[in-house]
Amino acid sequence: MRSVVITGVEVNVIGQVAVTQQFLPMLRRSEGSRVVFVGSVGGRVAAGFAGAYHASKYALEAIAEAWRQELTPEAIHVVIVEPGPLATPIWSKAAKTLDALPPSDLYRERLDALRQRVQRRGKESASPEEAVELIVRAVTASRPRTRYANGLAATALPAVRRLIPDRIFDRLALRIATHPVENKHE
């Protein structure tokens, strides 16, 4: 488990920050510069069994917000792109990770439901090209917004999450996590 946390933090946070730090001197010399971080809706709303992933995405959100405040006086825009779920190999990797877990009476029902959701999400998610379009908009906008998101999960879920008390949200999330996915195509 420790290597998963380190890898996620290295890729999702340290890598983006390190590259940006190397380019900051150049950005400071260029008019209209911007930093574009690629985050996730997972940096604004967390789900069970994905704590390490969410921790890395929340960290990136915090860095983007702090840097936006720090770099605004230098006329450097800081933007975070938060794509919703995308059809990438992450879903098949997650399914393989779930399949490799030892059997557990404690978590069986939730992990079985999660496995179904992961497999379905991999098939029904937006294309990676949609994320590319978001990034292009963030890079080319004459007056960039502070964040760019696409899809219902990335736009509505964080807004709704802020309105729902924690305990109620947790109960809703648990209810979703323990119910098998219905197959619309059967």
Image (cartoon, grey):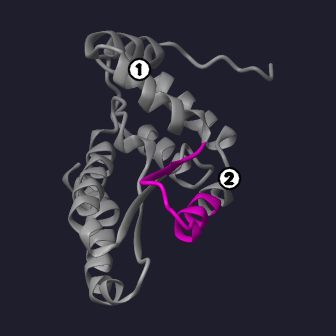
Residue 79 pos. (x, y %)? 41, 60
Q: Secondary structure at mark 1?
A: helix
Q: Amino acid at mark 1?
A: Arg
Spatial CA span between label 1 and label 2: 27 Å
Determine which residue is flagged by label 1.
110
Between residue 27 and residue 91, name the one nearer to us: 27
Q: Nearer the viewer, mark 1 or mark 2?
A: 2
**10 Å crowding of disc 2: few (<14), some (14-19), many (20+):** few
Judge from the rendering whether residue 161 lies leftward or rightward of residue 157; answer left or right. left
Crowd around label 1: few <14 · some 14–19 · many ≥20 (10 Å):
some
The residues colored magenta run 133-150
Residue 9 x/y as whole percent: 26, 59
Outermost residue, right side: 186
Q: Quadrant of residue 133?
A: bottom right
- Counting from the top left corner in percent of width and height, residue 111 is at 42, 26
State the image quarter where residue 6 is shown: bottom left
Q: Is residue 109 visible?
A: no
Please report contact status of discs 1 and 2: CB closer than 8 Å, yes or no: no
Where residue 84 sits, quadrant-wise, is top right
Return the disc, 1 or 2, that comes first in the chain's sequence: 1
Helix, strand or loop under label 2: loop
Q: Residue at x 53, y 63 (%)?
A: 138
Q: Is residue 98 visible?
A: yes
